[in-house]
Image: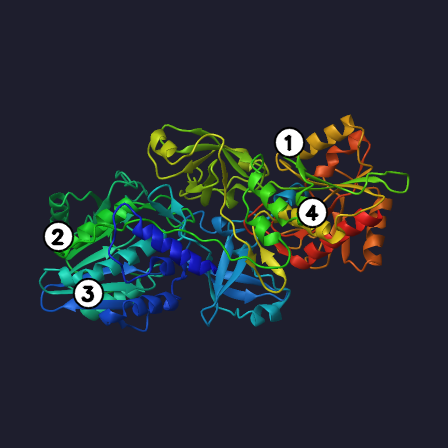
Amino acid sequence: MGQWTRFAILTGSLLLGGHRARAQANLNPAELKTIPAVSGYEQRLAAEIAHQLEKYSPKRDNLGDVYVTVGSGEPHRLIVTAIDEPGYVVSEITADGYLRVQRLPQSVPNPVFDALNFAQPVWIVSRSGKKISGVFAGLSVHLAPGRLNAPKMNYPDELYVDIGAKNAEEVRAAGVDLLDPIVLQRSGTPIGERGEAGPAVEDRLDIQTLGQLLTEMKDSEAKGTTTIAFVAQQWTGGRGLNRILTEIHPDEMLYVGRIRMEKAADGKTNQTEPEPGAGAVLGSPATASEAGKNFAAELKALANQGGIHAQVVTAAPPRIASYGKSAAFPERFAELSVPTLWPVTPAEYAALSDVDQLQKLLEAYLEIQKPSGGMGGGLGGGGVDGGGGLPIRWLTEAYGASGHEGAVREQVTRLLPEWAQKRVTTDRAGNLILQLGDGKKDEKTPRMAIVAHMDEIGYEVRKVEDDGRLQVAVLGGGYSQYFLGHVMLVHKKDGSHVGGLLELPEGWDKPGFEWPSGSKAMDEPARVYLGTRTKEETEKLGIAAGNFVTIPKEYRPLVGTRANARSFDDRVGCAALVEAVRAIGPDLPGRDVIFVWSTEEEVGLKGAATFAEQAAKEGRVPDFVFAVDTFVSSDSPLESKRFADAKLGDGFVVRAVDNSNIVPLPYVDRVVALAKENGIPVQYGVTGGGNDGSVFPRYGSVDVALGWPLRYSHSPAEVIDTKDLEALAKIVAVLAKKW
């Protein structure tokens, strides 16, 4: 079953299984959420909206607006929402295959907009409409201690898109060209019980709401004409809205979309920001005419009569910027919205209960006699379909933060050949262990351990707070902006998960905000929001202290043999060991080799340390330990090439020097010689970070660390070349047989 097929099926089941059954809307919510619509480049979304509303005979203009008119006579009502979102377009294709970008709108939507895009998966939309996977480059935390004046990752000058191409020709062969729009990938993750979050969530919910409204217009008893419009380029000056107002001259207008609360000259407001769960938000300008004030009052009265929660605020009208005279709003004008948290970020959140209230108010306004009863359930996400070849896809898509590696251990075991599955054991630290060979050690056949770690970075729930939020502690290290302000998954003990949001730091939306930086930034206290308001509500979701938390992830093929996924560190190492075991087979006479898939490497090499200590007690200390882990590479436009300059696609790497170990040069040269003898591409060099093998030398072992080049370590944007994984698996098998 394909990715989007599975997504659509899950979406349908959730919609039918929500709190209230909802009438089938013409606008498919799953499709709406996955079509990018950068301001000025909304054509594909506009075409899809027009297609799905085909039976209502929609009109389209050459700016990208889509609108449907129902009824006749006066008054002429306009209900309008925007369809565009902030994003980027390709502004340059570099000779080495990276994309440079220009932001649209050109003024930044908020202080963290660019910063939250670094090291995130993106879609580039080609002229043909194809969505091409890529990632924004980001710094690798392991290389930070070796840098002076590193980029701050907060401005488009430092944004590069990596689609896995090696040069400009490969970029164009993939279908990418200048001016192609770029947005963050999104999957419509439900938050808590009835919330949604992700890029442009409010905009898509507004589109869905107006689409649902159209299906109910046959039951409207309102006199006159109603135009429902989906307008383009709101973020770049309200150009679509300006066009619609010029075209139809409505008597009254409801703008359904983002509300900007009016502020004083000093930028402050004495109004309380509406919070999710409070219902719809009804906005009217302070400068509204008497007719405008009456219109807002009528809407509030409708809400009161229908038991609809609607909070009134003083709001600035939607922005229209024009070099000429702009179209005027009708005197009877008001705004409707739903409260959001962290607007215009990857963590933008809205509660579906508020969308229900918004829709009910619109239905009351249009005198619809058979209201739908609300939006129903949320949207679900889907996995990706499996693939053949190396087991890296399956391993990266298994979740297992440090101390919670059970699912990864099961996946490793499942991927091993049947004979190996019968031999594996698990020790008290949770390490998965496979002994090969007859154990007859002599001076020519050293005892060896080959180790790769199963865990990934994440967080762990320490406490459910009284207000329903989760207090979490970090498991591992990285740049906090890769995680704060993004959708998370809270993994429960039964193996299921609940969507949440890792909250942004205090002051994130204030001018001059600077992102906390440095390798210890993730150690600061963090909280996960679930859309709940009490400890009891959160506990009813099945969440408790001890659960672990991660960023959602997916294996994404890029151009050629390259791929993106979070937790390549160290699932590539795990996959290489699995492939080596397959290649070696059950018989390894005259050798003593033990394979270890270890736990809790990211929080202090704990699993490897337990294994080493036990081996010493039993008198079975390995002579050599081959720690198979990431070679964090500076093969990136953001990194210094002074060190760690191993190229993706040029082979596995002997990790000769890192922060925890120095491999004696004779052994570096010996691995290189074995690789060349067997036709395996090899590199060697210096990088940062530590490796599992470094806990063994105290007992007399030699740590010979191996790896593969990885871009953007400890981030959702990690990129590998699968040719390096193949080389790594081959050298592990050779070492087991010939070292």
> Looking at the image, is mark 3 or mark 2 earlier in the sequence?
3
Depicted 328 relative to depicted 415: above or below: below
Q: What scheme was used to colour the molecule?
A: rainbow
> Looking at the image, is mark 1 or mark 2 earlier in the sequence?
2
Q: Is residue 245 visible?
A: yes
Mark 3–mark 2 Cα distance, whole angstroms, equals 18 Å
Element type at marker 3? strand
User: At x 55% / y 37%, what residue is drawn?
Assistant: 521
* Residue 659 coordinates in the image, percent (x, y): 72, 38
Identify the amino acid type marked 3. Thr
| Mark 4 surroundings: few (<14), some (14-19) or many (≥20) residues within 10 A | few
* Mark 2 vs mark 4: in front: 4
Residue 419 marker: 4
Identify the amino acid type marked 1. Ala
Quadrant in which residue 607 is drawn: top right
Mark 1–mark 2 Cα distance, whole angstroms, equals 67 Å
User: At x 63% / y 47%, what residue is drawn?
Assistant: 571
Mark 3–mark 1 Cα distance, whole angstroms, equals 65 Å
Element type at marker 2? helix
Residue bearing mark 3: 227
Quadrant in which residue 700 is drawn: top right
Q: Is residue 140 visible?
A: no
